[in-house]
Amino acid sequence: MGRSLDVLAACEAFVAVADRESFTAGALAAGISQSVASRRIGALEAHLGGRLFDRTSRRVALTALGRGVLPSAARLVGAAADLVDDARRSRARPLSVGVPPSVPPLVLAELCAAGAAGRLPLAPVAGNPAERAEAFRSGRTSLFLENVPSDRARWTARLGVGSHPDDDATGTFHLGELRPARGRPTGALRRLWLQPEDDVPHVRDRMERARDEAGLAPVQVRVAESTVRALSEILVSDDLVLCTRPEASTYDLRWRPLGDQQLVRAYAVGAADESLAARFVALCSSAVVTVLGADDASDRATQTGLEPVRG
């Protein structure tokens, strides 16, 4: 193959002229001048080793060589057009992104709107941390909000405890409050439920160690099978749930910060394509803050403990 020959461009000119049996009409259809069409076809003839057309003053006819190679040339031109169409459809297809469960639809809509404004259509796929990681590994999502240790985080959200709205406790919460009070019925231990979103070692293990240090029973700090299960227990008892302040507001719970330790949910973007992750962050970081729990866009860091981690 000659280094200077653009085979696709030459085939486009060849097919256009062959279909119309005219260099003038073929060049017009290909969007080039007649002289360019003639030059490209001449280069293709030199490359293939023979004439593709018999030219007369009245018409242009394919030679035996021209008839023999036309189907392949037409397939090449068609495949190039298909490639462009596939690329267009791929760009228009929403990018699947794994997000935490129980995010309100309106909040997810804000995330999608932020992406769409930057021509990055998004399709949120909800799941707990393990489900988001598995969906990414299996190729069902292109990006996911990964629950990571705080030293790897881009965003963090402060955790506290939510309790029944009629709870009159104030100030910071200490695990020692879960110790049985005198006269409390046996088997009615007060519990702190962790949501599935917090079933990760850097949160779960720290809470279990703190539970043991406080002298509590193992059942008093445990992961709920679902957020709904945890909330249902709170509504019928004096149990508590580990949550962010915005979650407590959404669930209509009273919220108190943790006094035993500073504990956060911490997130990074999981992605195979670093440039795609960077684009997502550039367009959607503010919306991600809301997805992860910010309830006041003007003062996220001070009021919710949720903020982008710099650097």
Image (spheres, grey):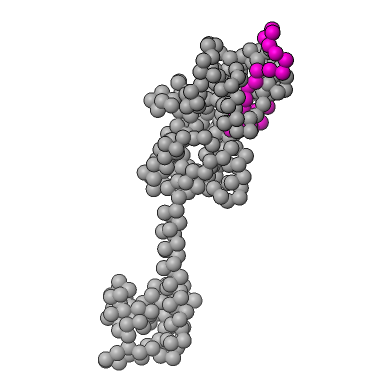
User: In the image, residue 148 lies at what x, y percent?
Assistant: 59, 34
Residue 248, relative to residue 143: is it above or below? above
Is 93 left, or right, of 173 in this rendering? left
User: In the image, residue 167 lies at what x, y percent?
Assistant: 54, 14
Q: Residue at x 32, y 88 (%)?
A: 60
Q: Nearest the camera: 308 or 122?
A: 122
How many numbered markers are drawn? 0
User: In the image, residue 136 lies at what x, y percent?
Assistant: 58, 46
Is 255 left, or right, of 9 in this rendering? right
Q: Nearest the camera: 16 or 85?
A: 85
Q: Residue at x 42, y 40 (%)?
A: 109
Is 220 left, or right, of 123 in this rendering? right
Q: Nearest the camera: 211 or 228?
A: 228
Q: Residue at x 38, y 75 (%)?
A: 12
Q: Is residue 20 visible?
A: yes
Is residue 151 in the magenta section? no
Is residue 188 in the magenta section? yes
Tell me where residue 105 sits by quadrant.
top left
Q: Residue at x 41, y 25 (%)?
A: 296
Residue 183, relative to residue 296: is it above or below? above
Residue, far top:
182
Instruction: Please state the extent of the stretch shown in magenta in the rendering.
Output: 181-205
Is 180 left, or right, of 281 in this rendering? right
User: In the image, residue 305 lies at what x, y percent?
Assistant: 49, 23
Q: Is residue 307 visible?
A: no
